[in-house]
Amino acid sequence: MRALVEAARRKGSALVVGLDPVPDRLPPGLRAEREKHEAVREFCRSVLEAVVPYAAAVKIQLAHFERLGPEGMRAYGELVREAADMGLPVIADAKRGDIAETAAAYAEAHLRLYGAHCVTVNPYMGADAVLPFLEEARRLGRGGGVFVLVATSNPSAGAFQEASEPPASELAARLVADLGEVRGCDYPDAGAVVGVTRPEAGRRVRELLPRALFLAPGFGAQGGGISGVRALLGGSGGGVLIASSRAILYAFEERGGDYREAAAEAARGMRDRLRTAGVKV
Ligand SMILES: O=C(O)c1cc(=O)[nH]c(=O)n1[C@@H]1O[C@H](COP(=O)(O)O)[C@@H](O)[C@H]1O
């Protein structure tokens, strides 16, 4: 986690800007007479340049690039490199997880080949599906790690993750606690994904993981706000990074004007609201 933590502290920002480019929502001027992957590539690069002063890191959602085929994945790889060159650590939002050998292949692809610092990981298959990602991050020594899905932001998450005893979210949190190691910074290299739309679950997960770094999506387009964020803070120094995608990428739809200026303004506003609320890493 060192790369993320250093960037967040240097910028004084707990904001992670998400790249979830939907071709049909790109500004019309960008879409005209161009292949989708080219428009997506330019849109994302320009948004990154616009938000770089306000963002601690970038989270790139793989699905939006996978669906554009090989050119989309090429654009993804280029964006990972460009973000890193801008001093923005990259979280590959891949939500992978499989038997150990397959997980190791995913880890090699995303952390070594494409060069992301962190990956989002699905814990449903257990510890051996998560560990290969941590082992790869540790071998690379670039201050990376994993964010394990613990209490997700989507509407039906609670019906699944809180239905059993102990709840699946608790098992996932325990897995994060067991696998994470503190390396080169004051957070373990395994963090938790906890949606800001789930404040009750968030409070419980924070009790189980008082020192972990949380990646908290759901701020903005999914309705999560500062009260949901506060539930994740806890009292013992656990950090929170807030991820927001659509509310930044498509800010121009409501504000009008240039999409880069709209994204920069949205990101600056969020960074400032998070600062005021005492959210930090
Ligand atoms: O792992 C994630 O990033 C994630 C976990 C979760 O519980 N909920 C969630 O929305 N996400 C991702 O966070 C982003 C949310 O985007 P916005 O709702 O537009 O901010 C998407 O890329 C989702 O795939």
Image (cartoon, rainbow, N blue to C red):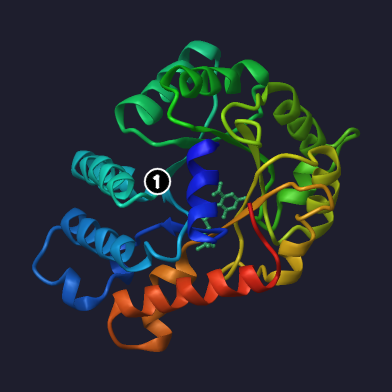
Q: Is mark 1 within 8 Å of ligand 1?
A: yes
Displayed quadrant of residue 22: bottom left
Residue closest to the far right: 165
Q: Nearer the viewer, residue 109 or 34?
A: 109
Position of 152 compared to 138: left or right?
right
Left-right relation of 3 to 36: right
The residue shown at (86%, 43%) is 207
Residue 44 at x, y = what percent?
Answer: 29, 59
Q: Position of residue 197 (x, y in %)?
A: 71, 62
Quarter of the image holding residue 18?
Answer: bottom left
Quadrant showing the N terminus: top right
Which amino acid is tagged 1? Answer: Ala
Q: Quadrant of ligand 1?
A: bottom right
Number of marks drawn: 1
Question: In the rendering, at what x and y percent does residue 251 appear?
Answer: 42, 77
Q: Secondary structure at mark 1?
A: helix
Residue situated in front as seen by the camera: 56 or 38: 56
Quarter of the rendering containing residue 180: top right
Residue at the image position 78 percent from the left and 35 percent from the top: 168
Q: 176 or 71, which is in the foreground?
A: 176
Q: Which residue is mark 1?
A: 63
Looking at the image, the residue that sits furthest to the left is 33
* Label 1 neighbour load within 10 Å: few <14, some 14-19, many 20+: some
Please state the horizontal and vertical placement of residue 260, each as a whole percent of the image: 30, 74
Task: Using the image, determine if residue 166 lies above or below residue 52.
Answer: above
